[in-house]
Image: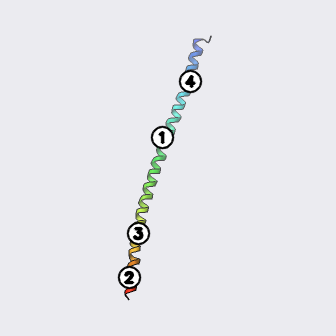
Amino acid sequence: MAKLSDKVKILEDEIKRKDEIILRLRNDKELLMKVSMRTEERNRDKDQLISKLSNENAKLQEELESKGKKRIKK
């Protein structure tokens, strides 16, 4: 039968190992949150760029149609 001190040592080692796992999980969680925030920022930037380009495209399309109508009238 194992001594009480041996059992205490085993339990302390197990607690230490679980604490290390918890620390790694917290670090992973923080990293995932940072990546998620960056992804949201990139998606927001892409959406803004798409909107800007869409507006510019619409303006250019209007100009092109306007010039085409002027040529037809001539």
Instruction: Identify the mark at residue 56; answer none if there is no mark.
Output: 3
Front residue of 11/50: it is 50
Return the x and y of residue 27 as percentages of the image width and height. Answer: 51, 38
Quarter assignment of residue 16: top right
The amino acid pointed to by label 2 is Lys
Mark 4 residue crowding within 10 angstroms, few (<14) / some (14–19) / many (20+): few
Number of marks drawn? 4
Front residue of 72/57: it is 72
* Disc 2 target residue: 69
Q: Give the Cα distance between marks 2 and 3.
A: 20 Å
Q: Residue at x 41, y 69 (%)?
A: 56
The amino acid pointed to by label 3 is Glu
The amino acid pointed to by label 1 is Glu
User: The C terminus is located in which quarter?
Assistant: bottom left
* Disc 1 target residue: 30
Q: Are marks 2 and 4 in contact (CB under 8 Å)?
A: no
Return the x and y of residue 48 as percentages of the image width and height. Answer: 41, 59
